[in-house]
Image: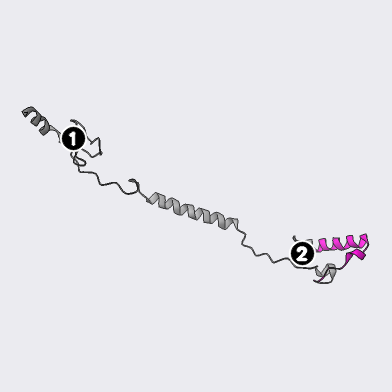
Amino acid sequence: MSQNTASNASKRFCTGCGVALTPGVQFCSACGTPIGGTARAPAQTSGGQNPAPWIVAGVLTVIAVAAVIYAATDRTEVPPPAVGLPAAAGGGLGQAPDISNMTPREQFTRLSDRVTSASENGDTAT
């Protein structure tokens, strides 16, 4: 019995978790506390990792997405297309003339004039 008491007296225990230590170790095999040192601080709730890099990465991602959306949108205002005929083609805006009574040559000339006028005015919708 005295031998059992002597072996218990020579055993060392971890100050962090209380596990019996084997002779000659420098760190606890259960919790990693240095032998002879103080107990380790409890781990953070995020698994022991610093949340700052994740916050920075999230903010940068939101900024990048906003920049892509901003660059992809067209911010120029385009005037709505005019309804009816241009003044050069049919005498002002209004109702289109009846081309069924025109000869094919007159129809072609009228169409050509409309296309030329639209091109000169930069109207790509017509």
Residue, disc 2: 121
Q: Mark 1: which secondary structure?
A: strand
* Residue furthest left as drawn: 2
2 vs 1, front mark: 1
Question: Which numbered disc covers residue 20?
Answer: 1
Residue 52 position, x and y percent, is 38, 51
Q: CA distance from mark 2 to mark 1?
A: 92 Å
The residue depicted at 79 percent of the width and 68 percent of the height is 84
Q: Nearer the viewer, residue 123 or 83?
A: 83
Residue 65 position, x and y percent, is 52, 54
Residue 114 position, x and y percent, is 83, 63
Seen in the image, is 15 located left or right of residue 2? right
Amino acid beneath label 2:
Asn
Question: Which numbered disc covers residue 32?
Answer: none
Q: Mark 2: which secondary structure?
A: loop
Amino acid beneath label 1:
Ala
* Membership of 114 in magenta stretch: yes
* Membership of 82 in magenta stretch: no
Seen in the image, is 97 located left or right of residue 7? right
Q: Residues within 10 Å of mark 1 (few under 14, many from 20)?
A: some
Q: Main secondary structure of the magenta part?
A: helix
Q: Reading the chain from its start, which is encountered first: label 2 or label 1?
A: 1
The residue depicted at 45 percent of the width and 52 percent of the height is 58
Q: Residues within 10 Å of mark 2 (few under 14, many from 20)?
A: few
Q: What is the image's colouring?
A: one colour
The residue depicted at 10 percent of the width and 33 percent of the height is 9
Q: Quadrant of residue 83?
A: bottom right
- Labels 2 and 1 touching (C-beta < 8 A): no
Magenta-colored span: 93-117
The residue depicted at 32 percent of the width and 49 percent of the height is 45
Residue 27 position, x and y percent, is 23, 36
